[in-house]
Amino acid sequence: MTTNQPDVAEVPGLASLKWLFAEAVGKRKVNSAHDAHLQLQKATSVGEKLKIIDAQFASWQQGCAAAIEEYFSQYVELGCAHHDLLNSDPLEWAEARIWDVLSNLCGATNPNQQESGHFEPVRWWLAVATEFNHNAATEPTKIWHVPRWLNRSGNSAARDSLFHSFLGRLTLTCFDVLYAEKERARFRIALKSASSVEPRRGASPDTASWKTETYGRIVVPTRARTPEDKVLSGAVQEDDPQDASMPPSQPFAEKNQDAFPPLLSKYRSEIKRAILIQLAKTPSASDLEICRALDGDGSAEFPKTWQSVQGERAFASAYLNGSKRSKIEKAISKVRADLRRAKLLPRR
């Protein structure tokens, strides 16, 4: 991608940051391909080989996701620090810089742009994984054929479809994680730019109740916990008539044994706890937005019993593709219902 390219070279520190991000993505790309090759040498069946390829490619996907999560905020900080040199918003600039590297190393391009990805990085990965051939995608005269156990029909159409499938997986992972990181960065910037707390109607700002928290490398002021926060973490309900006489730290369950139990302590499921946290942050979030947030912050692993293929980890991918969508919707609906019973979400 070449978006906003004229201002790229002028930003101090960009070359170093680009190298660090590319090194993180490239290292997982190479290591996963080498690991796949070592494991394939010991495999005895086609089914076992396919599982190895799928799991190690998923490792590359996870490596890209981890690199984006680590470096996107640094790109944003760099863009904000040199905003006067940019031709665009720092968030959009940072996103474009991320896609620049992903395009070169992974073949993935932003689905929102009118640009198509290219298969050379995927072809290289498969060649190294299956035959330890590092030259398949770099030397035009070097012929490499996809093994028949991986491309059973043996024709070029099936081969291209295989490349497209792997590239699609990689692109979707990068897009989902980058989308979540971009929204987080937008939220952090909004918090940092706030000069004062907007008081409740009829009340004056209580800046003494504020403290500082670090989001990535950005320090922002945050308000003391609200009554809604206290319900989620095990304290009193906002509309309880005994609130005024009860110490804030006393658990709600101790005041009224018949009351709705604290949700975080109620849930044993990691998925439900993660969904609860996302709904506490954004009560109006759609199911897809929650899935993207779960993929972005890594607060819950994609359950093995939900995986259509070994190594699958993306909630948003499974939701969009229809794979296990009903299970995801059911889990989110249960948490929403509990929040409504606790009077923390409006009734339908």
Image (tube, rainbow, N blue to C red):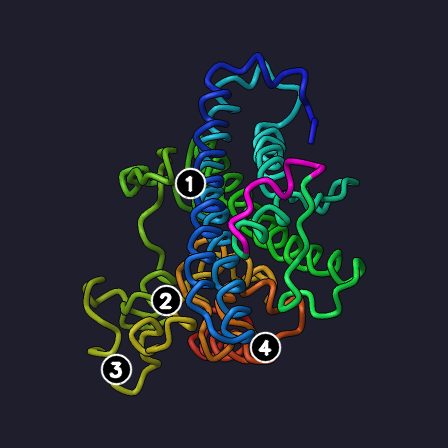
Q: Which of these two is toward me, 33 or 16?
A: 33
- What kind of residue is marked 2? Glu
The dot on residue 324 is 4
Q: Quadrant of residue 240?
A: bottom left
Give the residue pinned by disc 1.
70
Numbered disc 3: secondary structure: loop
In 3D space, how far apart are the residues under numbered discs 2 and 1 (Cα atoms)? 37 Å
Whichever of labels 3 and 4 marks the residue nearer the N terminus, that label is: 3
- What kind of residue is marked 3? Asn
Q: Are marks 2 and 1 in contact (CB under 8 Å)?
A: no
In 3D space, how far apart are the residues under numbered discs 3 and 2 (Cα atoms)? 14 Å
Q: Is residue 329 left or right of residue 146?
A: left
Q: Quadrant of residue 219?
A: top left
Q: Is residue 145 left or right of residue 64?
A: right
- What kind of residue is marked 4? Lys
The dot on residue 5 is none
In 3D space, how far apart are the residues under numbered discs 4 and 2 (Cα atoms)? 36 Å
Whichever of labels 3 and 2 marks the residue nearer the N terminus, that label is: 2
In percent of the image, x 51 and y 76: which residue is there? 45
Give the residue pinned by disc 2.
238
Q: Are marks 3 and 4 in contact (CB under 8 Å)?
A: no
Q: Which of the two marks, 2 or 1, is nearer to us in this view? A: 1
